[in-house]
Image (tube, rainbow, N blue to C red):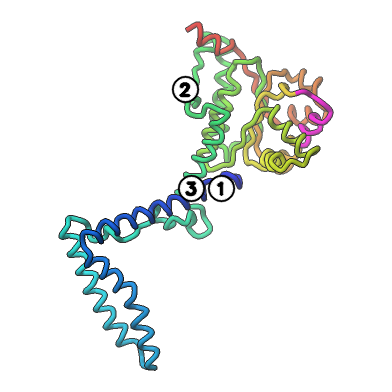
Amino acid sequence: MSYEAQVMRAATEQLAQRRADQSEEYRRRREQVYARLPRLAAIDRELRQSVASAAVAAFRSGSDPTAALDRLGQQNLALQEESARLLRSIGLPEDYLDEKPVCPLCRDSGWVGARMCQCLRSLCTQEQNRQLSSLLDLQGQSFDRFRLDYYGGVYSSERAAMQTVFHTCKLYAEQFATFPIRNLLMTGRPGVGKTYLSACIARSVSAQGVSVVYDTAIGVFSHFEAAHFTRDEESQVSKRRYLRSELLILDDLGSEMTTPFVQSALYELVNERLLSHKATVISTNLTPEDLGRRYSLQATSRLLGEYQLLQFQGPDIRQEKKKR
């Protein structure tokens, strides 16, 4: 599992900025301390110059550099002890000027061998969530806040149906890597919680280090169209994201104008993601019968045959919230 290129690029830039900020912080520290203790600046210069000077002198004479390096080591140790005493004299720890990485595991490279370090993974997750939050309310929408009491009484059929839908979505998100169901098709009237649970899934799966892309059907198919007819570079990139992300959440299928091109694009999107074993969550206000009438037989067959159908029931939650 990996993040998208643009997410990785933004996170890597943040990591580089973090390194630059850390380096700048130590530069400021040195300036402040050197202003109070000029001797420290001289010691640091001597320490930087001593190794090269001793090695050059030894090799120029053609002699064994071991004795010179031993003397150098003793001199450097004395200089370091003097530096430590000076720092303690003004109430600072001995390592105050020693540059330390923000992340000791990878030393701010972002990688531990071939494995992404947790620090870079965390930045990737933050960046991905920032992008998702421009379209979804990730902060306000979580599984913990989902309320079943909007869906009828405790023993009502609506409540029972939505409890099954909720638990399926929660398990799908929390066990994303191993959950046997890879694709969800959410159907139901507007306002019954499809987008809410889609946001919950996006938030939970993103936190696991998985590339997640969310967009509306109108947005997806407009990029497909621009990529096909105008060769627009931004749309080309967006199309690749839709096809390759580990999880694609396609919201409000059926809100777009259904043209022959859109029917073809839907089939391409669904079929390619199935063939490459990429997970997809699609929400729509259309019934399964409506899907069959609106889209091609090939696309509908894959949606109804390869996706787990989740039929949302209940009232318009937005209206219910206003009443309460």
Tag count? 3
Q: Is residue 80 above or below residue 88?
A: below
**Of the pair 176 and 264, the residue shown nearer to us:** 264
Check disc 1 and report the residue beneath it: 8
Closer to the camera: disc 2 or disc 1? 1
Q: Residues within 10 Å of mark 2 (few under 14, many from 20)?
A: few
Residue 49: name its quadrant. Answer: bottom left
- Magenta stretch, residue numbers: 257-268
Distance CA(mark 2)–CA(mark 1) = 30 Å
Q: Please report whichever mark, 3 or 1, sits nearer to the chain's N-terminal start.
A: 1
Which residue is depicted at the point 43% across and 50% down?
18
Q: Position of residue 256 (x, y in %)?
A: 73, 24
Check disc 3 and report the residue beneath it: 14
66 displayed left or right of 235: left
Check disc 2 and report the residue beneath it: 145
Is 35 within the magenta? Answer: no
Q: Residues within 10 Å of mark 3 (few under 14, many from 20)?
A: some
Residue 264: name its quadrant. Answer: top right
> Please, what is the three-letter code of the amino acid marked with disc 3?
Gln
Q: Please report whichever mark, 2 or 1, sits nearer to the chain's N-terminal start.
A: 1
Q: Residues within 10 Å of mark 1 (few under 14, many from 20)?
A: many
